[in-house]
Amino acid sequence: MNKLHNLILSTIQNPASPTWFPELTEDLTNYGWQQLYREYGLQTDNYSADAILNNGVDNKPNKTIIALEPSTKALYPISVYPVPEKIASMYADSGAKPYSIEILHNSTVLQCLQEALDVLAEIPSVYETVSRLVNSLHILQPEDDEFDISFSLPDIPFSIFISVPSKRMENDTLRVAEAILHEAMHLQLTLIEQCVPLIIETEERYFSPWKNEYRHPRGVLHAIYVFCVIKQFFGSLLAKNQSRASIHYLENRCNIIAKQLDEINSFIECPYFTNSGKSFVRTIIAL
């Protein structure tokens, strides 16, 4: 633990490291798997969101819909699973529902998801980081294809839930790639916080321009982190050969995120950061 603790500190304080911390993720996820094995007896070969929800027991194992991997790179695949019934019930009012397996196999949804992985793989260290953190990906069908929904849960450490438009749309792959990266980075920061506390507990709330509401400092810090990662990733994509529509989308998202980060700049002085938290937030915002 001391070795991992020191590795985290050296990484999150290193201004030369990409914000997705590719040099940290392997050790961090190994720690996460050790914790899961101790608590539930789960490893990569028997892990599922259902097993976490049922205290280590999955009554319907081996139900992968498909394992997807980037088409042009020899990188780890990411497995797509049905949305657990308990999760579907919990988020029934969120504006999204699970796709049926039949629709997934007879629509363009998986094609869009495949292309989103190709987008992530344009920066290989981004895809490698994401694929270590995301053991299972669950696809949601949005009520409106123009709006994206995604979430992850701290108690389910290697699973993410994202919406994919039911039909092909301009820049849909960039939207889905952003959602995958967004949720993977939430998982990563949760693992970091298990080893190195960044926030001191408090009842205080701070305004989040992303949620347009007041949130616990931890929630605001998570938002700052994931959007700093997305901004840096999209900036890296802009340096590569992109279509005119993609360039416009990427530049627009980077500008929007930059404005949101400016809105919340005073949060850096929040008194509820640990010393490690202060170093962390100042480093990622400066990148």
Image (cartoon, rainbow, N blue to C red):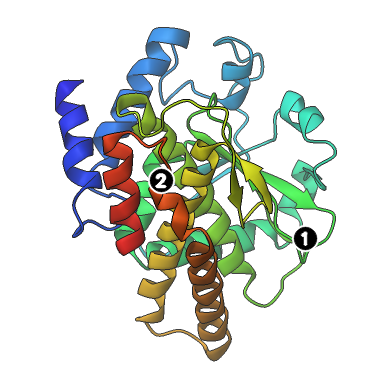
User: Marks 2/1: CA distance?
Assistant: 24 Å
- Quadrant holding the C terminus: bottom left
Residue, disc 1: 166
Amino acid marked by disc 1: Ser
Q: Quadrant of residue 18?
A: bottom left
In the rendered image of this protein, does residue 50 appear above or below residue 258? above
Q: Relative to the observer, which residue lies in front, 140 or 109?
A: 140
Residue plotted at (46% across, 38% down): 187
Q: How many marks?
A: 2
Q: Are marks 2 and 1 in contact (CB under 8 Å)?
A: no
Residue 229 image position (x, y, % from top left): 41, 58
Residue 166 image position (x, y, % from top left): 77, 60
Instruction: Report whether residue 138 is seen.
Output: no
Residue, disc 2: 131
Residue 227 image position (x, y, % from top left): 48, 58
Q: Relative to the observer, which residue lies in front, 149 or 113?
A: 149
